[in-house]
Image (tube, rainbow, N blue to C red):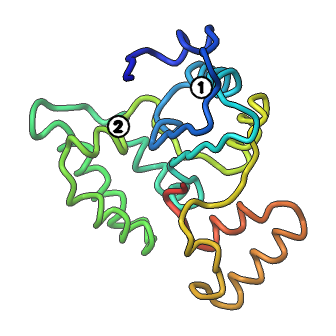
Amino acid sequence: RVEEAGCADPAAQRPEARFDYAAMHGVWSWVDAETRGDIVALLGGWLAPGALVYNGYNCAAGWAAAAPIRQIFREAPAGAGDTRYAAAREAVAAWLSYAQNPALDALWQRLSKQSDAFLAHELGAAHGSAVWFTDLAEALEPAKLGFACPCELHEQFDALFLDGARLDLIRRGGEQGWGQTARDLSYNRTFRA
């Protein structure tokens, strides 16, 4: 059965039977705080104890340096049609010409090849934001949801992908209670699932 509704409507109701699974891909990063609250209420009311939730979202660790690019795309005057972000693209290129940030240059090289339709979503969306793991975990606590694991198996084996300094940061972060943030920083992760 497929039903179309905003998050607030079903959050105010109770289902006939609670669900064991829920999936959100790219939702949390693109909605306002009120809608996030509705999502938490929906999950808390509709999921059975022990249910699993998949949540794919833009990860702040990898997007933090790109915050100025996102701001330029929100503030530069928008054109029409296929050249909607011409002014924003020019402004970003001008800024990066003297910003001296190789990692951000590489990110922009990848993003600049995308269509304006993609950039409207990724950079120009009014509520688009990158999320820190701890902020997400705190927001989901009222729904009694906690972190189980990353959904991709290879993300369980840091030693296969990271060098000693990054592994040490993850180890220390884990010991001090901020291991997931340390992991996101070590991978410079832009998306988390």
Front one among 2 and 179: 2
The mark lying in front, picked from 1 and 2, is 1
Quadrant of the rendering where the N terminus is positioned: top left
Given the current orientation, which residue lies at the most extreme front position? 17
Question: Which residue is the site of mark 1?
Answer: 39
The Cα–Cα distance between marks 1 and 2, rounded to whole angstroms, is 23 Å
Front residue of 61 and 76? 61
Which quadrant of the view contains residue 41? Answer: top right
| Left or right of 119 on screen, residue 192 | right
Q: Position of residue 59 (x, y in %)?
A: 55, 53
Q: Is residue 186 above or below residue 94?
A: below
User: What percent of the width, then of the height, locates residue 185?
Assistant: 64, 67
Q: Residue 79: x percent and y percent?
A: 16, 32
Q: Residue at x 46, y 55 (%)?
A: 66
Left or right: where does residue 57 sit relative to residue 81? right
Looking at the rendering, in which quadrant would you find the C terminus?
Answer: bottom right
Q: Residues within 10 Å of mark 2 (few under 14, many from 20)?
A: many
Horizontal and vertical percent position of residue 146: 76, 45
Residue of label 2: 124
- Is 168 drawn above or below residue 181 in the view shown? below
Q: Amino acid at mark 1?
A: Ile
Label 1: which secondary element: helix
**Identity, as a three-letter code, of the amino acid under mark 2:** Gly
Tell me: residue 190, above or below residue 20.
Answer: below
Residue 83 falls left or right of residue 178? left
Would you identify the image quadrant in which residue 14 lies?
top right
Tell me where residue 85 sits by quadrant: top left
Q: Observer-nearest residue: 29 or 11?
A: 11
Q: Which is more N-terminal, label 2 or label 1?
A: 1
Q: Residue, x 46% and y 34% (percent of image)? A: 30
